[in-house]
Amino acid sequence: MGKYLLSVCILLISISFSAPVNGAGLRASGPMVVVIDPGHGGEDTGAKGPSGLEEKHVTLRLALGLAEKLKKRDDIRVLLTRTADVFIPLEERTAFANRNGADLFISIHANAASNKDAVGIETFFLSFEATDEDARRLAAFENSAGQPGGARQAAGAEDDLKSILLDLANTMSHHESSAFAEAVHTTMVGGTGRENRGVKQAPFTVLVGATMPAVLIEVGFISNPSEEKWLSKTDGQARLAESIAEGILSFKDALARKRGHIEVSGRD
């Protein structure tokens, strides 16, 4: 864990000497760069549903579908942190976005709970203080993916991030990450009709160090038999991909208007 924290600290030091293009989230010219991060992968399977569906496969399939939709646009360039079933440390995912000058970063996950009746969509942006206890536990679960062998620890994984997250408060584009989360969450809930569990804050390691608006989405509960089935179906995946794309375009337009750009995104 010590080596992992050291690598995160080194990353934060390195980004302090660089700045996002034209401020967070929108470059002066050229296509917007969107980095899509399919959660988990390889030895880190993520959560597993009642029928055996693994989170890592749900997230990759959805990420590829979302990328396909966005790549149809000339004003957006899409990059993925992984395109196959491979393990990538959490800190490397954000570092990839920073190296490629990303304007937006979105990490895709599927939720899980001991209560098999739990359903719905949640969207998160980075904060030291979790919105509630469920958000804190979820962040601890997701953060443990960065440990050797993909070990899953039930709680407390975010404790070691306290000092760097406190230092991060003044450098992260928290306001724009919050707006990005609201935009994507609104279109996801509206486009899929799934239960709205709200936009929340939590200390997710994968969002630490991002120099652009960054969010983590939980697209449904793989632990719920009905929602697991929906997440595995082509229709469910397609509706999610379409609604997430709409949220990205909505935020892109809002950011352009805020910064005085005239053009807004046309819808396909």
Image (cartoon, helix red, strand yellow):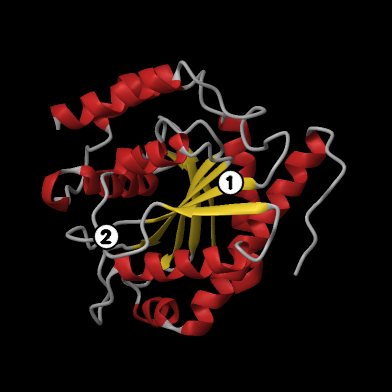
In the picture, residue 73 is in which quadrant?
Answer: bottom right
Closest to the observer, 229 or 98 = 98
- Can residue 118 be seen here? The reply is no
Q: Which secondary structure lies at badge 2? A: loop
Residue in the picture at 33% in, 45% down = 139
Residue in the picture at 25% in, 69% down = 48
Q: Amino acid at mark 1?
A: Val
Q: Which residue is mark 1?
A: 33
Residue in the picture at 31% in, 62% down = 113
In the picture, residue 130 is in which quadrant?
Answer: top left
Q: Is residue 63 left or right of residue 32?
A: left
- Can residue 18 be seen here? The reply is yes
Residue 254 percent location from the top left of the image = 76, 44
Q: Amino acid at mark 2?
A: Gly
Q: Quadrant of the C terminus?
A: bottom right
Residue 15 percent location from the top left of the image = 43, 23
Whether tag 1 and tag 2 are in contact, CB under 8 A, the answer is: no
- Is the residue marked by circle 1 packed among few (<14), some (14-19), or many (20+) residues within 10 Å? many
- Is the residue marked by circle 2 packed among few (<14), some (14-19), or many (20+) residues within 10 Å? many
Which circle marks residue 41 in the picture? 2
Reply above or below: 76 against 21. below
Q: Quadrant of the N terminus?
A: top left
Q: Is residue 1 left or right of residue 237?
A: left
In the picture, residue 140 is in which quadrant?
Answer: top left
Residue in the picture at 79% in, 32% down = 259
- Front label number (1 vs 2): 1
Q: Which secondary structure lies at badge 1? A: strand
Residue 32 percent location from the top left of the image = 64, 46
Reply above or below: 89 against 188. above
Give the alpha-carbon distance from disc 1 to disc 2, as whole Å: 23 Å
